[in-house]
Image (tube, rainbow, N blue to C red):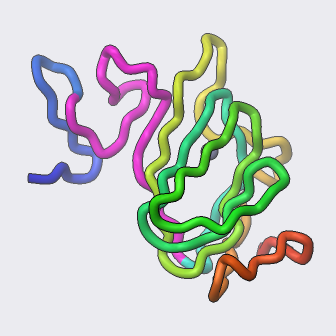
Amino acid sequence: MTTAHNEQRGVDGDVVIARYMGAESRPSWSDVTSAGVFTIEPGGRFDRHFHDCHEYWLVFQGRGVVLVGDEAFAVGPGDIVCTKTAVEHDVLAVAETFKAFWFEGATSPGGRIGHLHHTEEAAKGHGVLHVADPADFDLASYVAPA
Ligand SMILES: [Zn+2]
């Protein structure tokens, strides 16, 4: 049996199985800021952002190019992208439908929740390039589609 999107199953009123976890939908004992799955199609959109917590992406479908800090990495199924608090990260390109599980660790008291941006332009997001082979990606010549 699987869990439908946004549905939760629990025991004694507490969350045990979920498709998304956030402040109002995580186990009472958990300090996870949020967790779930995101999908990016070729030609889709994403936004360069950072968090007031550490974040991990476990890629499980598709290949792509991610930016962590000022370095680009070609990634594919099984790779875990580890991003430290306050470090900008982004998905620049995908070769096919790209799916990853994201997991945000604990946010310190007073920390902000969600995608945080250094500029209004970054908050608007950008097109994600469609590339044939992420290994050929060249960050030096990268220009984000509008
Ligand atoms: Zn993030």
Q: Residue at x 64, y 84 (%)?
A: 133
Residue closest to the eye, 82 or 89: 82
Residue 96 sits above or below residue 29 on the image: below
Q: Residue at x 31, y 16 (%)?
A: 28
Residue closest to the eye, 11 or 65: 65
Q: Regarding ligand 1, which quadrant of the image does it lie in?
A: top right
Residue 43 image offset from top left, x and y in percent: 61, 79
Q: Residue at x 66, y 77 (%)?
A: 134
Q: Is residue 66 left or right of residue 145?
A: left
Name the dominant secondary structure of the magenta segment: loop
Residue 104 sits above or below residue 74 on the image: above
Residue closest to the eye, 122 or 29: 29
Locate the C terminus by quadrant. bottom right
Residue 45 is a magenta residue:
no
- Residue at the limit of the structure toward the right, as seen here: 140
Q: Is residue 21 left or right of residue 107?
A: left
Residue 109 sits in quarter: top right
- Residue at the limit of the structure toward the bottom, as seen here: 132
Q: Report the number of numbered marks.
A: 0
Q: Point out the stretch of residues depicted in magenta.
A: 16-41
Q: Residue at x 43, y 68 (%)?
A: 61
Residue 80 image offset from top left, x and y in percent: 53, 51
Residue 36 image offset from top left, x and y in percent: 41, 46
Residue 37 is a magenta residue:
yes
Residue 121 sits in quarter: bottom right
